[in-house]
Amino acid sequence: MGADVSICVVTNIGVSFVSSRRNWFIISVMPRRAGRAHVVRVKKTHVDKQGSERVYESVLLRRTYRDGPRVRNETVANLSMLPEAAIAALEATLKGHTLVPAGQEFTVLRALPHGHVAAVAAMARQLGLPALLGPAGRSRDLVLGLIISRVIHPASKLSTLSRWGDCTLGPDLQIAGACTDEVYAAMDWLVDRQDAIEKKLAAKHLAPEVNPSRMALFDLTSSWVTGRCCELAARGYSRDRKKGLAQIEYGILTDPEGRPVAVRVLPGDTADPVAFTGIIEVIRTVFELDRLVLVGDRGMITSARIDALKELNDTGTDFGWITALRAPAIAKLAADDAPLQMSLFDTHDLAEITHPDYPAERLIACRNPALAAERTRKRDELLAATDHDLAAIAERVARGTLTGAGRIGEAVGRVINKHKVGKHFRRTIADTSFTYERDHAAIAAEAALDGIYVLRTSVAATDLDAAGVVESYKNLARVERDFRSIKTDDLDLRPIHHRLSDRVKAHVLICLLACYLTWHLRKAWAPLTFTDENPPARDNPVKPAQRSPAAQAKASCHQAPDGTPLRSFRALLNHLATLTRNRIRYHDTNIEIDTLTQPTPEQRRAFDLINATIPLTIA
């Protein structure tokens, strides 16, 4: 025979076993006496002359019967030569199980991605996000679905609605059949609750009990808008480098760790100082906080804004600030008889100075050698590029192909606007001539201040030393990280497709709350991703931050020390999505049940890290 065939027949009078292997047969028939048959596995150990130990296993079919008061066992057949699958089938049959051909006992009606939804929903409930949004109801379920969807698969509202039925989020929250009108009504409901939501977040993360440093970070960014009818759209300075497109602006307030607390949406042509004035009013009147230190960049907290804060503090509040000086103010401090001299940095990279123009304030001067080298490199490249383009214009003028002071000025202006170093060139333009030369004195004066920046603060030295001021200002990088998460890395906020102001505000608020979720998930899942779990403390706050050796090892090996494969945050969510919930229907019955696929070790670990079990439903 060309194949092995094994047949086992179980009857009420005994067990007959027939094994066919190639050209021979073995038939063993159980005696016709009554009794209960079972499978026994017998292991024997043998040590050969070389001292090697071998283990042999015999699989026997035995019958148990009574002989008077005694219970005896009788070996009926040796099953050792059978395939393991056949032995398992016989053993299951003898135990009373009904065996049917594989694939005919039930049908998997549908499999829905579940793991990523369950993980994000579990973190949302741990953070109290549903209760934070408002009272239970249809609107809250829809908004919660929009927030979770923004984390697991950011897309437009119409695309999001179509996906709700393709994962367990829609069925579990009972929002799979929602229409666009319902979603827009839920967004309007959310906007009406924005102040209440952000007030709770501020109390949770900015109150003195949880924020003893009384510090908050604020920064402004922009995103472009599609269409021509958005009420908030305007042309302004584009942080997205989308020149010529209408945009909106939005400022994010965070705690010192960069955890988002509040957001305010503004017209696209709003200046940074105006946004800062607005957030101060929100902090004071909505959040009811009157003692806080605001950290913002030099374009945000200007001298005029500081004067306004001082006037406000005269009414009983206590708002402090940490910001930086602009280049002209630094140049003034570096004059011949001014306090900012290069000798301050002979032994240290930072020094605290004073100046009469900044009464009751502290000035911390810093010099970053790496930043100085980078600025020198960029300036040299821009000067060389400008030299090259101006030389081409001068050659055209000399050949007579470019004449007229107006036309020559236009050509020179295009070059100057392109490279932005026109202040370092002296230019003489006439109808038939054009000459230029570098202003070496201006270049040397600017180069002398390369890598130098000066911070100004109202915080007393007893509350925060000079190094602490520098670290607090550099924490603005955490807000920039939130912007990257909201715009590109995780949540894909841009571009804005909505037209009405409230819808735009609701869209940005949904992204902020999704960023709040993502912030906590990234922190919890750091052992499974490339996130630096324990970034080293900087002995010199002026120097650039460094990654820990453990994080560098993770990045190079793409696995944890225990061998666990590492993924990006988005890849981890995609891996969790492979944990599906399956709807099963058993044949010849009306029984339908839901069951989960077997989770991988990484999926189990992901839920363990957020202190959650893998639930069958998220409702």
Image: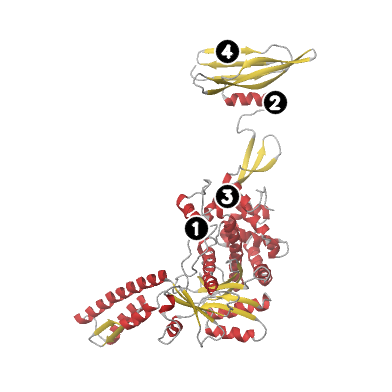
- The x and y percentages for residue 540 are 48, 68
- At 54% from the left and 23% from the top, the residue drawn is 54
In the displayed structure, 63 sits above or below 427; it is above
Secondary structure beneath dot 2 equals loop
Secondary structure, mark 1, is: loop
Q: Earlier in the sequence, mark 3 or mark 4?
A: 4
Type of residue at label 3? Ala
Mark closest to the chain's N terminus, 3 or 1? 1
Distance from label 3 to label 2 (Cα)? 38 Å
Q: Which of 257 and 51 is in front in this view?
A: 51
Q: Are marks 3 and 1 in contact (CB under 8 Å)?
A: no
Dot placed on the residue nearer the N-terminal end, 1 or 2: 2
Q: Do callouts 3 and 2 mark residues in contact (Cβ within 8 Å)? A: no
Element at label 3: helix
The residue that appears at 63% across and 26% down in the rendered structure is 89
Report which residue position mark 4 lands on.
26
Disc number lying in front (4 or 1): 1
Mark nearer the N terminus (2 vs 4)? 4
Q: Residue 548 carries which label?
A: 1
Q: Are marks 3 and 4 in contact (CB under 8 Å)?
A: no
x, y percent for residue 469: 54, 74
The residue tagged 2 is 95
Q: Nearer the viewer, mark 1 or mark 2?
A: 1
| Residue matched to label 3 | 577
